[in-house]
Amino acid sequence: MAAQFGRRLRKGAATTAVAAVAVAALSASQAPGVNDHGRQTAADATPSPDVSASDDSATGNSPYYTDLPPLKSPNPSPSTGPGPGGTGATESGIPATVLDAYKKAEASLRESKPGCNLPWQLLAAIGRVESGQARGGRVNAEGTTLKPILGPQLDGNGFALIKDTDDGAYDGNSSYDQAVGPMQFIPSTWAWAGRDGNDDGKKDPNNIYDAALAAGHYLCRNNWDLSQQSELDRAILSYNNSREYLNLVMRWLDYYRKGAHEVPDGTGTLPDNRSDDGAGTSPTPTVPGATTPAGSTPKPGPKPEKPGSKPEKPGTPQRPGGGTAPSTPPTTPSTPPSTPPTPTDTVDHLEDAGTAKLTAMAGDAFDRRISTRAETEAGKAVAKVRVRFTIVGDTDTTFTGGEDVATVATNSSGVAVAPALQAGEKTGTVTVRATVVGRAVPGLDYKATVTERAADALARTGDAALTCAPGGTFANQVEVKATYKGAVADGVAATATLIKSADDPTATDKGPYFKDADGRTVRTLTGLKTDAKGLLKLPKLYADDTTGTFLLRITTAGGATLTVELTVAAAETSSPSPSDSPSA
């Protein structure tokens, strides 16, 4: 009964705003509380006031299904699963292949980005809202939808205006972009966010394994921790920049957390209502060759004329209230109507917006970020243009969050600021290329430098004297700690050499020595590295028969140097006492 009430309440919803009212009403009808996972329910999860979603989004802010979950908590039972017609007693059933894709994406992200804390139920919530779980699980054994799922073309007619960015490769539309697949990615986002989730060597937005993994990585970028409500809000808003969308996804997330079960592919429930209902557009995403889904009502066509009624004369304009309007001679426009240019159309070039020198040590985050300004031919800044930043070349440097591509919308000053760069272990020059999405203008390359890990200070961790008898073994091993600007310097390359003198750093050929793996004498060690705590413990030292004071010099990348004294001396022998001397 509760589910039916929910459907009646939504049936007249013609816009997203009406759906938002329904969300509020249903939220008020449920007592606030904490779910089994110790997190807020959607009713309590008020978005944080500091949420600032980007103008860009995974879906291009395309329409979505507005059906709400039932008021009653799910009670999964195999006997209550949906029948062949696609409707069932519970909304908690998720088609088997689709559910498997969500869970595999969660497992993959748990390994690659453990700090994100992505729950598979979030992917299920977004998949429900975006495509009704791949149109009720209409996928083949590999997870590819039986027919493409396409959102309406984003031509600015009631939707965002996004001109073609992929030459129709993903959406078959060479004029405008359309959201594609079960997770509804627009082509320009899929170009960098796409993943191969089923290991078939392809990144296909129409495959639920690929799309679910891509959605997971998209939601986990920027080092977001989805166990934090404010960062979860940001991630969802970045998928579709709408408060109503955020509230709706939170509803389904809460619902699936309380229970969900597997149903056969192709038998999932199909949503009825979309955020674009009544806007003069298709009420469901375009599915070529598809029929009206079960449970939905087709829009009525024009009413037939009454028998015997006199048809109006062709071309006679009608008044809204009946009768005819004054006749005016037809006019032929001198020029065909044209679509007004978008901000992207006006971009002539990209300019650097004051990016400082980009340098970081391997493993560290760059403390400067790339800033690019989009400008017209006259040098005027252009806002709301999507700029794509791509790390090119053989490097393991990424943006924060592990991605090598990021898309950012320019602000009111025409400036797009790329996410922070995270240096990898490969040293050298890294190139980051800025391009305008949907506009063929020359890209702008930025150079960043990754230097090897360095230390500026070395110190022994102990102060015990390093002494040994000729031909013996030093009792204590040399251990040092490396720091850089007072902080631990981990992974820093070091060299240890037994030198001839303080003024001659070449290796000596006598005195203390190390042994290699084959037991041979060596007096220079290379390829050493400090550990995670900045510590470096040298192998055991041995002494030959030469006595005296010797020097061990340790140097690191960055110029840190430490010289340690080693002493090789024969054991002291006591002099005979007078009482021990022979008597006269």
Image (cartoon, rainbow, N blue to C red):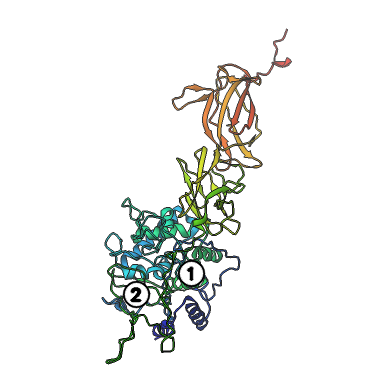
Pinpoint residue 104: horizontal percent, then vertical percent: 37, 59
Image quadrant in which the C terminus is located:
top right
Q: Quadrant of residue 309?
A: bottom left
Q: Is residue 115 visible?
A: no
Q: Nearer the viewer, mark 1 or mark 2?
A: 2
Query: Which residue corresponds to the image point at 36% horizontal and 60% vertical from the top-left?
Result: 173
Quadrant (top left, top right, bottom left, bottom right) of the N terminus? bottom left
What is the CA distance from the residue labelled 1 to the residue labelled 2? 28 Å
Secondary element under disc 1, as helix, strand or loop, is loop
Q: Where is residue 366 drawn, in percent x and y? A: 58, 46
Q: Is residue 311 above or below residue 39?
A: below
The residue under label 2 is which amino acid type?
Leu
Work out whether residue 572 or residue 369 is closer to the camera in this orientation and state it: 369
Badge 2: how crowded within 10 Å, few (<14), some, or many (20+)? many
- Reply above or below: 31 against 433: below
Q: Residue 37: which disc? A: 1
